[in-house]
Image (cartoon, rainbow, N blue to C red):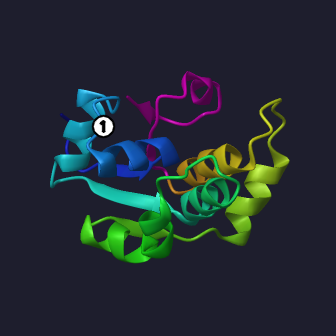
Amino acid sequence: MESGLRLLLDTHALIWWLAGDETLSERARAAITDEANSVAVSAASAMEISTKFRIGKLPDAPLLVQDFEMIVAAQGFAELAITVRHARLAGEMKIAHKDPFDRLLIAQAQAEDMVLISNEALFDGFAVQRLW
């Protein structure tokens, strides 16, 4: 595994990591556990998880929603705030993909030169490096 990568977790990758879910690929798991790599979680993921919990799509996530910052910090992950630049880049994307959370993650990965840990092959068409 290449060392020194700056990783950004897609929301599903974060959830699967925290749950110990086998759906998270071995390659992604290895990159996350490699101490040479830095791992970040976007504020967009906090919003996505909270939103999905509120509307009933993530009913098993009350503790994650309540203690999101503490859980992220306990994993040794950095928080990645959404900047005006990130939001502008996400809004400017001329893509059919309408999911605002994915748009923000793509924009953040592009702007911050980060590798996106995601199973979303759709991301490969957006000038972002994806690891799965």
Left or right: 9 as drawn, with respect to 39: right
Q: Is residue 79 above or below residue 35?
A: below
Rendered image quadrant of residue 3: top left
| Magenta-colored stretch includes residue 122 | yes
Instruction: Give whichever of 61, 92 is nearer the camera.
Output: 61
Left or right: 115 as drawn, with respect to 37: right
Left or right: 67 as drawn, with respect to 32: right
Mark 1, secondary structure of its residue: loop
Please tell me which residue is depicted at 55% across the width and 57% down the height of the picture: 45
| Magenta-colored stretch includes residue 111 | no
Where is residue 72 drawn, in percent x and y? 36, 67
Please tell me which residue is depicted at 70% across the width and 46% down the height of the picture: 103
Please tell me which residue is depicted at 54% across the width and 52% down the height of the picture: 59
Rendered image quadrant of residue 22: top left
How many marks the image carries: the answer is 1
Q: In this view, does 73 lie above or below 8?
A: below
**Which quarter of the rendering shows the N terminus?**
top left
**Pointer 1 local density, CA inside 10 Å: few below 14, some 14–19, many at least 20:** few
Residue picked out by circle 1: 21
Where is residue 63 drawn, in percent x and y? 42, 68
Instruction: Give whichever of 36, 31 is nearer the camera.
Output: 31
Rendered image quadrant of residue 81: bottom right
Where is residue 109 drawn, in percent x and y? 54, 49
Where is residue 115 drawn, in percent x and y? 43, 43
Q: Give the range drawn in magenta.
A: 113-132
Q: What amino acid does circle 1 point to?
A: Asp
Please tell me which residue is depicted at 37% across the width and 28% down the height of the picture: 132
